[in-house]
Amino acid sequence: MKIIVCVKQVPDTAATMSVDNGVISWGDAPLIINPWDEYAVEAALNLVADQGGDVTALCLGKEGETEAIKHALAMGADSAVMVSDPALKGADNLAVSKVLAAAIDKIGDADLVLFGQQSVDTDTGLLPIQVARNLGWPSLTLVSKFESLDPAGNKIQVLRTMEEGGQVVDSSLPAVVSITKDYGEPRYPSFMGIRKASRAEYPVWSLADLGIEPPSAAVSWPEVREPESKEIVTEIIEGDTPEEKAKNLVQKLIAEKVL
């Protein structure tokens, strides 16, 4: 079977965002693979180990931003594809989903497309659903377990993690699946995997290579600014007994016209 895993490069989760003259900055924070996407790569590798086949990592971003792809390759992905085009600057989820769907079509013959549950920077969790809609495929979100998979019969059964339990869902293939961290801990890249990934070569496709025009974004950010800072003062209410503290607190609230 053929599995495509969509990975994204994001700022380190320990980074602090700031706004400088209307431009978002993450400072000198390194770029890493989106942590949620590691679970998707792990799931893809396990499925291929069980069913046979290959895993392709697909990433959309700037041509020099290779950490996400290299990490997926180091974990064990067989190949990779990068989509990069200056016309995609400022693209929102809607535009990105159309580009990823075109890239998936160009790669061809995929049985499954896997995503992480969400990305740590935009945090919407909508991209897997939007890509599925563009492909015309079923969308299986918040998956924590693959109950069964039959590529020959084009059937799949998954367990979706819900707030109050689980939901078992049957679907046809091909399908788009988003993976939660409940799936299981992703493996660490091996030393040999890291060396192989550092030497790996993969195509970089532009929009022209995909045969599509720059998609229009539905959402734009004409202005970005940091929220106004507010000074917070903490006052400890004194008193010898709980009752006295409560009385002093009420008097304070009345004086501040809260009550």
Image (cartoon, rainbow, N blue to C red):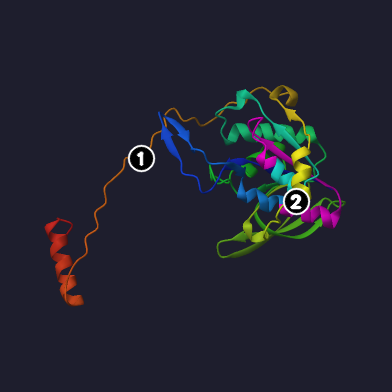
Q: Which residues are magenta?
A: 42-69
Q: Could you tell me which residue is drawn at 56 percent across and 33 percent down? A: 92
Specify the quadrant of the image occupied by residue 157. bottom right
Say above or below: 69 vs 35.
Answer: above
Most foreground residue, 139 or 39:
39
Residue 49 sits in which quadrant?
A: bottom right
Q: Position of residue 60 (x, y in %)?
A: 66, 34
Q: Residue 30 or 125: which is nearer the viewer?
A: 30
User: In this figure, which residue is indicated by the disc labeled 1?
Assistant: 227
The percent position of residue 58, horizontal first and vertical second, equals: 72, 39
Helix, strand or loop at label 1? It is loop
Residue 183 visible in the shown view: yes
Res 191 label? 2
Residue positioned 26% across, 47% down in the render: 231
Quarter of the image where one finds residue 22? top left
Dot 2 falls on a residue whose secondary structure is helix
